[in-house]
Image: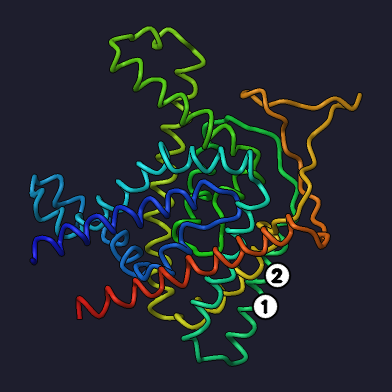
Amino acid sequence: MESTRTLKDKMFLILKGIGMGAANKVPGISGGVVAFVAGFYEEFIYSLKKVNGKAFKLLINGRFKSFYNYINGRFIVLLFSGMIISYFSVSLVLDYLIKHYELYVWSVFFGMIIGSIYYINKDFRDWNFKTYTSLAIGITLGIGISFLNPAKENDNLWFVFFCGIISVSGMTLPGFSGSFILILLGNYVLLLVDSVNALFDTFYDVLGGNLNFVNNPERIRMLKVLAVFTLGSITGLVTFSHILSYILKHYKNITLSSIIGFIVGSLGVVWPWKETIYKLTNDGAFIYDSRGEKVVENFKRFIPEINLETFYAILFICLGIAIVLALEIYAQKTRKTHA
């Protein structure tokens, strides 16, 4: 019975990782929100904090089991395995759904964020001048970021490293969408589409015994970009986890109220009813990216008309709220089981 429960826990932890990975790839959604709602946010932050000098000393000295136990290896490995699986499976499905059922997908996400706000806020009782102020600052920053215009693509490796540090913040800071920040920095397609596709193609070639890609300068460039982006992401994860663990320990209520504000502010990013505005040349022609798709410049939000499509969208918003509430119920049951 114990082994069955352990296997079940492992499967659910991988599923949580898949949920975080899918959320991280979608602009406007934060993987940190998934961690928060599913009830493992603080364990996630404190586990990452364990990646420190002591951990590297254990690793260098060959004490691999001690290193694995010290950094809460079982938790980290299963969670990140789920994220990797997500990037090559669920995220591809999400790309398809957003392309063909954009309104309904954004409606589900909108509902999930509303549910997340309810979840985080329902047990928060320490409202005072400081927490209200941090709430207001969080809302202001969230709204301000959502209305910024994207920059141009930049594959300078130092800038790519910086993008890695910033983008991974969505995993550690609920409400702060790393994917949306990459859009603003101009590198979403480069780092989360083109470079990932290059890695996938490389795996496919290697498994097939085809090593001709080493003579393909464009493929090598994309792999370099992905490697530097990954290094920046790891740096950001470890750095942010140390900062956040300290903040959560000493300023927990202010941090939580800021997070609530940030998530409220992010609602504008995932507002379902919006018109995509594409970049144009001076002659009025569309600008296309490396995938042959139109480059997005911004979104024009509008109030929906009363029709059947809007009714369905509202139902999907309710579905998004229900998903978060179901996650909350599961998290409560899990905590009771392990108590």
- Mark 2–mark 1 Cα distance, whole angstroms, equals 6 Å
> Of helix, strand and loop, which one carries label 1?
helix
Q: In this figure, which residue is indicated by the disc labeled 2?
A: 140
Mark identifier at residue 136 = 1
- Mark 1: few/some/many CA within 10 Å (<14, 14-19, 20+): some
Residue shown at 32% from the left, 49% from the top: 80
Which amino acid, by three-letter code, is at mark 2? Thr
> Of helix, strand and loop, which one carries label 2?
helix
Residue shown at 80% from the left, 41% from the top: 277
Q: Quadrant of residue 281?
A: top right
- Location of the C terminus by quadrant is bottom left
Q: Is residue 147 above or below residue 226?
A: below
Q: Quadrant of residue 240?
A: bottom left
- Whether residue 71 is visible to the viewer of this picture, yes or no, is no
Q: Quadrant of residue 334?
A: bottom left
Taking 51 as reference, is 18 left or right?
right
Which amino acid, by three-letter code, is at mark 1? Ala
Q: Are marks 2 and 1 in contact (CB under 8 Å)?
A: yes
